[in-house]
Image (spheres, helix red, strand yellow):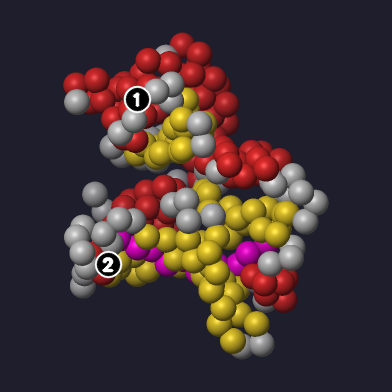
Amino acid sequence: MADADLARHLLRAARAGTLATTVGGQPFASLVTPACAPDLSVLLLLSGLSEHTRHLRADPRCSLLVAGPAEGANPQTAPRLTITGIAEPAPDPALKARWQAVHPYAALYADFADFTLWRIRPAAALFVGGFARATRLKAADLLPDPRHAAAVAAAEAEIVAHCNTDHPDAMAAIGGAIGGTAGPWRMVAADLDGCDLALGERVVRADWPAPVADPQGVRAALILLARQARGA
């Protein structure tokens, strides 16, 4: 798999990251909980009381670091991705619903008046696939095909409803294989790179073998994942 695909999968699976902002020329880093829009824009639900939100209002330039698990004791063997971009408020109920789908615990505070959804459109990135393996990526390298992303996004609600209503056993099998816990896993989001499955407040990411172009591609990828999960 190409580094750009690995980087995209890493970003879509990230549930925590480090946001870097600036204030008066001084760098500042803070923990945030990202999600991804269908077009790979990063979504952040931020409190207006936080330091990083005040920084973004003054200077929207920022970067975000996300990382996967290390291969061993050395943390530098972990894959990680740093994206740079411009942050902007994104008061879109559909995008907020997508963020909440992968952060269900946030229902306790997501509707508080001081919380606002922000969006970062990646302008460039650095992907480190492990020790001494780094690739610089332009937005054109990292971002998915916009036509394919839009085609799957338009059908996402129908895909999610159909899978949960008509194929709960397949969702349970895929979720159990990836999450390591048996139970009534449900699909909560889908895009051209994969889908997100939830069991209570736990959410796991299932990647398609390759990016898909339309709902038919999603169906084929799900059939393959279900077969693999049941075989395992």
Residue 182: which numbered mark, if any?
Answer: 1
Residue at the image position 34 percent from the left and 25 percent from the top: 182
**Foreground pick, 218 / 81:** 81
Q: How far is mark 1 from mark 2, CA to CA?
A: 30 Å
Q: Is residue 227 or residue 144 the one in the foreground?
A: 227
Most foreground residue, 80 or 104: 104
The answer to whether residue 88 is left or right of residue 188 is right
Q: Secondary structure at mark 2?
A: helix
Q: Residue at horizontal 49%, vertical 19%? A: 164
Please state which amino acid type lies under the numbered disc 2.
Pro
- Answer above or below: position of 36 versus 207: below
Whole-percent x and y of residue 90?
Answer: 69, 53
The secondary structure that most of the magenta stretch takes on is strand
Residue range highlighted in magenta: 79-88
As drawn, 97 above or below 30? above
Specify whether residue 130 is in view: no
